[in-house]
Amino acid sequence: MDLLSSILVVTNLIFFFFKIPYGVPDSITPSQILSDGDTIVSREGNFVLGFFSPGNSKNRYLGIWYKSIPVQTVVWVANRVRPINDTSGILMINSTGNLNVIQNNSVVWSASTLEEAQSPLLQLLDTGNLVVTDGNSEDYLWESFDYPSDTMLPGMKHGWDLKRGLNRRLIAWKNWDDPSPGNLIFEITLHNYPEALLRQGSTIYFRSGPWNGYGFSGSPGLKPNPVYAFKFVFNQDEAYFMFTLKQSLHSRALPNQTNFMFQRFTWTEQGWQLFGSLPIDFCDTYALCGAYARCLITDAPVCQCLKGFKPKSQQRWDSMDWSQGCVRNKRLSCKEKSTHGFRKFSGLKLPDTTHSWVNTKMNLKECRAECLNNCSCMAYTNSDIREGGGCAIWFGDLVDIKQFPAGGQDLYIRMHPSELGSIRKLNKKKRVVVIITASIISGLLTLGLLWRFTWKTTNRRRGRKKEDVDVPLFDFTTVATATNKFSPANVIGAEQNDTLLAWPKRFDIIIGIVRGLLYLHQDSRLQVIHRDLKASNILLDINLNPKISDFGLARAFEGDESEVKTDRIVGTYGYMSPEYAVDGRFSVKSDVFSMGVLMLEIVSAMKNRKFFHPYHHHNLLGHFPEDRPIMSCVYSMLTNEEAILPQPKQPGFFIERSHSNSGANEESNIENEVTITMLEAR
């Protein structure tokens, strides 16, 4: 090792004065070095590679950080275990492509390529990935994305390269001044049914649940949206998770050693904004309720034994110590396995997959048979819910089950036949009720058709050709009494006679509608676009709680869909977003536009087509749909009084107000007839 260090130092001295030329700012070759104080910048200027000192520390580290962000945000550190205590550090690449960080006469960090290069080149990409290539080859002989520090960037594989035995995991910094590896780790566990874990040593803080085709079963909010796209790959060569961006912005995700959470941030003009974090709530605590129990955050207490199970220790359970979990009411016997059955539990985060097995080619029926024939199998479900395919089965106790108020997956748990008797009886009763109901309805329909036919035949024979107007008639006295002698207060649509709601109640209605849209866009199993959000589709109960109705035009997005274009434009003008009304393009931003119009109506107590000013051409068409916030941001703006609202952008095109010299002749017109929204180009 001393001989190697000496050779490297001599080589360093030979090329000491070969600095990085200005013509190739994003890469270095074996004839160049990167000294402390020098940097290389990615081609589009997104990232910088150089030496830095974190926080209040005086130690020097080789790292990568964002260039365009004023607050230095480091995303990768090379020598995080061995810092440099002065400014003598240099980075060099040798003739075969190996990397070395040298301080005086010692190598403090090194990296070897998968194979020797003939013309090695070290380049910093605009993704934040530092790569070694052989000349102009696009194959990477080494890349920093394979050896992450604490930050996950878009396009980075988080997980396993099974051929090389390489685990790409994230390890938090010890503190803000020390980037050396801390104790908090976020990684993909390599079971038969992989999932993500946030742990400190052997203590697990959060488990994501396995990937179900759309997302992790324990993180229903982690699914494709207008900002992010997610991908999970599991085969004989790799097992990794990746996220990419659909918009041009900066994003990063990392474990936080301070609060023991995994957090995702996006950069705005106000700084790094928290986009999401795990765990979400108390029920995300690993194995909080023990075996065969589920946690529902809206329950009190949050832990409840599954149906067919009871607390292992009732005394501890009553004292809210749920660690021992639950046991079966009736023990299972392998000799009676043919009589066993399965009870379906819905809306769950799937149990810990440490002891599980997966077959992607089986269907659900075959999966049930496989589980029933194995006495050790305690539960089964689909491994991929997109088309109901695949088979996942669990052996041993079922631990860390969370119940979601909405969404989640189905799980079929093995039960003693005595526990299934009530289910079978109930199913039999349901079948009998259905048969009887269907028979009665069929009989009534038959009688109705027969009566109708007889009535028409009788009228035809009598030669009755007179057609009565099917409109009810009322005499003058009845109408006068009902309208209080035609009082103006009873004129339909008279706004001056309406009782306006107080501001707090209007605000509560707005919040309720926003929460409903947030559920449709983000929290439901499939992302749903309403497409016809308007005042008449918001129903209020007796307490004026809003409910979104009329989903006849709604569209569910699957997979990585974020926008759809259609030639059949349906909806209500005045509420339709411009890009949908003109081009037929709709996304979650279409509902955001409709929500904005609806909020204006609620605040102003006027319909969107009610007011027209001939000298103003102000409209909402001057904004790009990309500039509209998503519903989670809208909810945050409305509910967080300390939130800093983003400044609205200038419209791309507008017409100034025309001036008139006949001031007395200017007037504003109130038009009550039905109009069609006029769309103007940007």
Image: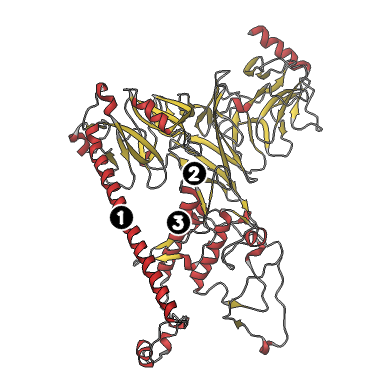
For the residue pair 577 and 103, the one nearer the viewer reads as 577
Q: Residue at x 33, y 54 (%)?
A: 438
For the residue pair 280 and 498, the one nearer the viewer reads as 498
Left or right? Give the position of 506 relative to 77: left
Percent across and percent down for residue 221 are 47, 44
Q: At numbered mark 3, what does the secondary structure look like: helix, strand or loop?
A: helix
Left or right? Give the position of 449 relative to 593: left
Q: Residue at x 51, y 62 (%)?
A: 533
Placement of 36 over or under 561, stated as above or below = above
Q: Nearer the viewer, mark 3 or mark 2?
A: 3
Residue matched to label 1: 437
The reply to whether callout 2 and callout 1 are in contact (CB within 8 Å) is no
Tag 2 or tag 3, which sits nearer the N-term?
2
Kindly report the distance in space between the C-alpha atoms of the residues bearing marks 2 and 1.
Answer: 49 Å
Kindly report the distance in space between the C-alpha atoms of the residues bearing marks 1 and 3.
Answer: 35 Å
For the residue pair 183 and 313, the one nearer the viewer reads as 313
The reply to whether callout 1 and callout 3 are in contact (CB within 8 Å) is no
Tag 3 or tag 1, which sits nearer the N-term?
1
Percent across and percent down for residue 272 are 56, 45
Q: Nearer the viewer, mark 1 or mark 3?
A: 1
Q: Which mark is residue 516?
A: 3
Q: Which mark is residue 276?
A: 2
Placement of 290 over or under 267, stated as above or below = above
**Type of residue at label 1?**
Thr
Q: Which residue lies most toward the top here?
A: 3
Q: Residue at x 34, y 45 (%)?
A: 297
